[in-house]
Amino acid sequence: MHFLPESIWKAFHDFIYPLISSKEVERERDDSLNVLTAFRRAYEENNNISFSGDLRQFLRDSMLGLLFAGRDTTSTCLTWLFWLISTNPSAQTKIREEIERELHVKEGENWRFFGIEESAS
């Protein structure tokens, strides 16, 4: 028994299965970095020990968990983002330069808070 109507499940399946299929086709390009590739690698590295279904089911269920657990995934993504930035000084420098450029911060100038008008646009 599902807690969502069948039409929602159909829409999710219509969305996720083409993505899974396109990623399975790209298996040769193992250098790509995306969520589906990471889950596929985890599935294959664990030799399907902790999951009884096939790869498509595993990927579908993993993506469903990410979509429904938005709060937790957002905090996890932000944690990873800040960790990755902290371990990559060149990316940190580029991000800081872009922020300074977009906020029009001049050399030696103090940072400022956004005003109401700026945050609304």
Image (cartoon, rainbow, N blue to C red):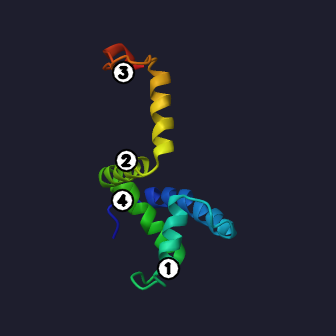
**In this view, the mark in front (2 or 3):** 2
Q: Earlier in the sequence, mark 4 or mark 2?
A: 4
Residue marked by disc 1: 45
- Cα distance between the residues tagged 2 and 3: 23 Å
User: Residue 24, relative to residue 79: is it above or below?
Assistant: below
The residue singled out by tag 3 in the image is: 119
N-terminal-most mark, 2 or 3 = 2
Mark 3–mark 4 distance (CA, rounded to whole Å): 36 Å
Given residues 14 and 18, the one toward you in this image is 18
Say what secondary structure mark 1 lies in.
helix
For marks 3 and 4 on the same chain, the one whose residue lies earlier in the sequence? 4
Tell me which amino acid carries mark 2. Phe
Tell me the residue that label 2 is attached to. Answer: 82
Q: CA distance from mark 1 to mark 4?
A: 32 Å
Furthest-front residue in this view: 108
Name the quadrant containing residue 99.
top left
Q: Residues within 10 Å of mark 3 (few under 14, many from 20)?
A: few
* Residue 55 at x, y percent in the picture: 53, 76
**Along the viewing direction, whichever of 43 and 19 lies nearer the viewer:** 43
Residue designated by label 4: 4
Q: Secondary structure at mark 3?
A: helix
Marks 1,4: beta carbons within 8 A: no
Q: Circle 2 sits in a helix, a strand or a loop, which is it?
A: helix
Chain-order first, disc 1 or disc 4: 4
Q: What is the distance, in whole Å, between disc 1 and disc 3 at their CAs? A: 45 Å
Of marks 1 and 4, the one in the foreground: 1
SS for callout 4: loop
- Looking at the rendered image, the disc whose residue lies closer to the viewer, 4 or 2, is 2
Label 4 Cα neighbours within 10 Å, binned few <14 / some 14-19 / many ≥20: few
Identify the residue at image location x=37%, y=52%: 83
User: What's the mark number on residue 33?
Assistant: none
Q: Note whether 93 is above or below 109 in the view shown.
A: below
